Amino acid sequence: MNPHDIVEITKDIQPDQAKDMSGYGLERIIKYTARSRHSYTAMLPSGVPIASFGVNVHPDAQSGTAWGVVGAKAGKYFLGVHRAVQEFLDGCEYENIFMSVRKDFDRGNRWAKMLGFEEYRMVNNHFGEGEHGVLYRRTK
């Protein structure tokens, strides 16, 4: 994953995810995603990035936090993106993987469950502007 991919994807990001990202700022997101030991970018045959995802390892090295950025152009390719993320998560060596999604981001919450994450707890004021979220956990 190249930080430039994140910049390109955010130029045409799906509106619900743009709201999530606005509270963090693009520079902070790039720094966070660049620290991932395991991260990938899905590209169109033309070389245009449409989604990036990865896991940042926690200090205990037994767990991590999953992140993903999905562009609006991923629409008709989403099943392929989903399968790639599912395969990646199935192969992760971490005992627990966490993922947070804004509480009112229906697509994000639905996708977390499709990926095998279960609701772990609610997180208050987790996203920008005091937005509440759901912390999910996926356990091996």
Image (cartoon, rainbow, N blue to C red):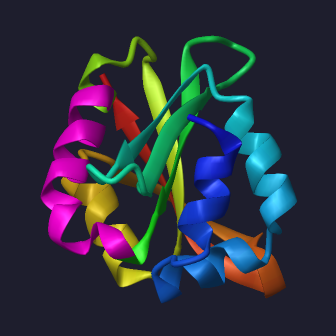
Residue 126 found in image quarter: bottom right
Which of 116/68 is in front?
68
Residue 71 found in image quarter: bottom left
Residue 114 is left or right of residue 41, and the answer is left
Quarter placement of the C terminus: top left
75 inside magenta stretch: yes
Residue found 68% across the figure and 24% down from its top: 58
Residue 127 found in image quarter: bottom right
Residue 60 position within the rendered picture, expressed as x and y whole percent measured from the top left:
69, 13
Residue found 63% across the figure and 37% down from its top: 2
Figure check: 28 above or below 129: above
Residue 45 position within the rendered picture, expressed as x and y whole percent measured from the top left:
26, 49
Which of 40/97 is in front?
40
The answer to whether residue 104 of the structure is visible from this angle is no
Figure check: 60 above or below 110: above
Residue 81 is left or right of residue 97, and the answer is left
Residue 25 is left or right of residue 4, and the answer is right
Residue found 24% across the figure and 73% down from its top: 75
116 inside magenta stretch: no
The answer to whether residue 126 of the structure is visible from this angle is yes
The stretch in magenta equals 73-88
Residue 11 position within the rendered picture, expressed as x and y whole percent measured from the top left:
61, 75
Which of 88/45 is in front?
45
Residue found 53% across the figure and 76% down from its top: 17
- Magenta-colored segment: predominant secondary structure: helix
Quarter placement of the N terminus: top right
Figure check: 54 above or below 50: above
